[in-house]
Image (spheres, rainbow, N blue to C red):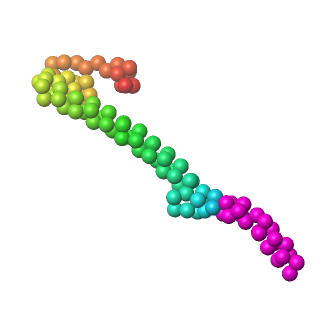
């Protein structure tokens, strides 16, 4: 009984500190919108935004190539030669190692 009275006196004296500590634990770790989850979500949002920017740049580049193909009739031939190493029957193709690395 003496230990219970001592514990109760401790709780009565420090009830605000205990309440604040319980609040920090609940909000920081246990809650659905805890700080730990919010930091994880913020990291995921920044990663997804950078991925969006990468795909947006790729889209703009592909749109530019498509417009180039629609306007220039020789562009298809140039792309076939550069990217797919196609050639005309009377031509020889020389591939340099520097070109392969790109």
Residue that appears at 17% across and 26% down = 68
Q: Position of residue 7 (x, y in %)?
A: 81, 72
Q: Is residue 31 visible?
A: yes
Q: What span is in magenta?
A: 1-22
User: Could you say which is closer to the camera, residue 14 or residue 94?
Assistant: 14
Could you tell whether 100 is left or right of 90 in the image?
right
Determine the main secondary structure of the stretch shown in magenta: helix
Q: Is residue 86 visible?
A: no
Q: Is residue 96 above or below residue 25?
A: above
Residue that appears at 68% across and 60% down = 21
- Toward the bottom, the furthest residue is 1
Q: Position of residue 32 (x, y in %)?
A: 52, 62
Which quadrant is home to the N terminus?
A: bottom right
Q: Check if residue 85 falls in the magenta segment.
A: no
Could you tell whether 9 is left or right of 57 in the image?
right
Q: Check if residue 14 falls in the magenta segment.
A: yes
Q: Quadrant of residue 24?
A: bottom right
Residue that appears at 51% across and 58% down = 33
- Toward the right, the furthest residue is 2
User: Could you say which is closer to the camera, residue 52 or residue 18?
Assistant: 18
Q: Position of residue 62 (x, y in %)?
A: 25, 33
Q: Quadrant of residue 75?
A: top left
């Amino acid at each position: 009984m003496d230990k219970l009275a001592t514990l109760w006196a401790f709780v009565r004296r420090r009830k605000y500190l205990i309440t604040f500590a319980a609040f920090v634990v609940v909000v920081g770790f246990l809650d659905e919108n805890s700080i730990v989850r919010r930091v994880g979500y913020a990291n995921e949002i920044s990663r997804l935004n950078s991925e969006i920017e990468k795909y947006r740049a790729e889209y703009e580049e592909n749109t530019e190539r498509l417009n180039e193909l629609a306007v220039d009739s020789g562009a298809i031939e140039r792309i076939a030669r550069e990217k797919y190493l196609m050639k005309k029957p009377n031509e020889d193709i020389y591939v340099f190692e520097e070109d392969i690395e790109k």
